[in-house]
Image (spheres, helix red, strand yellow):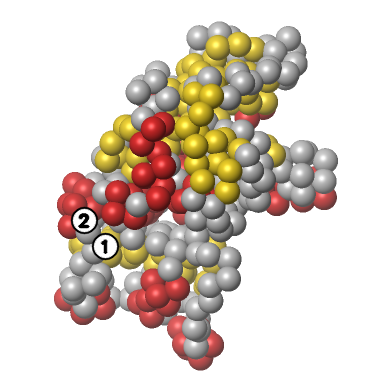
Amino acid sequence: MKSAMFYGKHDLRIEEAPKPVVGPHDVLIQVKACGVCGTDVHIYEGDKGAADVTPPTILGHEFSGIVAEVGPEVSDFAVGDRVCIDPNHPCGCCEPCRDGINHYCEHMTGYGTTVDGGFAEYCAVDAQQVYKLGPNTSFEQGAMTEPVACCLHGIDMCNIHPGSSVVVIGGGMIGLIMMQLARISGATKIALLEPVAGKRAVAEQLGADLTVDSINDDPAARLAEAGFGNIDVVIECVGKPVTIEQAIGLAGHKATVMMFGLTKPDETITVKPFEIFQKELVLTSSYINPYTQRRALALIDSGRLDVSSMVHAVASLEELPDILGKPEVRALGKYIISPEK
């Protein structure tokens, strides 16, 4: 089968790989759509993502497709089912799993990280991690379920209440999802800070009350002019020290700052403890997607969450090295890979 095999930093090869063998508890998925994630970029650049990767490995953890084969012990899925996956498979036996925090599993299997993933024509997945798509969900939308699930875990920690004011920093796919989830959670004033005009335009279509060019404008002044007042929640979706520091600076009294963007492991930020004390800030972050996959599927299928407007293009596996390797290409928006192209 055709696959995108990762061999190390900046070394991704489109090549033939053996079709996966289906174990007794596995489902073989014919991949129809696989999203390109910021974690894939970190791995391609030789950095650590949410999990360690040992090459050679087929990357890709945001994917959907059709069940092509089921193992003899699988009863909940049949050939032809339209499905997506939760790529983080906990062992269920270690101390974190038994304590109800299975996203810190000590023996986590990660499809597209610790084992082969969805940048290929087929992927074998434990049936425990497979979910059926709703009738209104396309394969491209289904591939977005995992990032939505991660965003839901983050939004649950943001302390958004009816009437809250929220600022989202970064208008990529994650920022645009967070902006919508903030509205669903009850926020009445939502601003997006983003330097790319096209992404600001999408945010406005999705209901942002204010969009600000974060490079050429003064965000604090623009927010004050728009009547945002005390900002209750700031969600950072870029993953750079400068934008995390900006988030802390913009946050109001008793605000929550969600550091959602993934920085490089060795990066640091400058924090003034007196500022945290004076404003009584809550600084928090969010790690992957525990127990949120079903809710993500329901939101997408209901139509209440738009996961299509931020997709720039559906591309082929052959285009993936350029997408991962060229920031100017990634800046155009979210990419979905279709192994059939």
How crowded is the residue under tag 1: few (<14 C-alpha within 10 Å), some, or many (20+)? many
Q: Is residue 1 left or right of residue 251?
A: right
Which residue occupies 65% across, 51% down? 52
Q: Which residue is painted at 21% across and 78% down in the image?
A: 218
Q: Amino acid at mark 1?
A: Glu
Q: Residue placed at 41% from the left, 42% from the top?
A: 321
Dividing the picture into quadrants, the one containing residue 175 is: bottom left
Q: Please, what is the three-letter code of the amino acid marked with disc 2? A: Arg
In three-dimensional space, the C-alpha distance between marks 1 and 2, rounded to whole angstroms, equals 6 Å
The residue located at (70%, 51%) in the rendering is 104
Residue 173, image x and y in percent?
35, 48
Q: Nearer the viewer, residue 114 or 97?
A: 114
x, y percent for residue 243: 39, 71
Q: Is residue 111 visible?
A: no
**Labelled pair 1, 2 in contact (Cβ < 8 Å):** yes
Say few, some or many: other residues with alpha carbon within 10 Å of mark 2 (under 14 / 14 to 19 / 20 or more): many
Q: Looking at the picture, does residue 266 appear above or below residue 152?
A: below
Q: Nearer the viewer, residue 276 or 146?
A: 146
Secondary structure under the numbered disc 1 in the rendered image: loop
- Would you name the residue on which mark 1 appears? 194
Classify mark 2: helix, strand or loop. helix
Q: Which mark is residue 200?
A: 2
Residue 26's image quarter? Answer: top right
Numbered label attached to residue 164: none
Image coordinates for residue 194, horizontal then vertical, percent: 26, 62
Q: Depth check: 157 or 214 in front?
A: 214
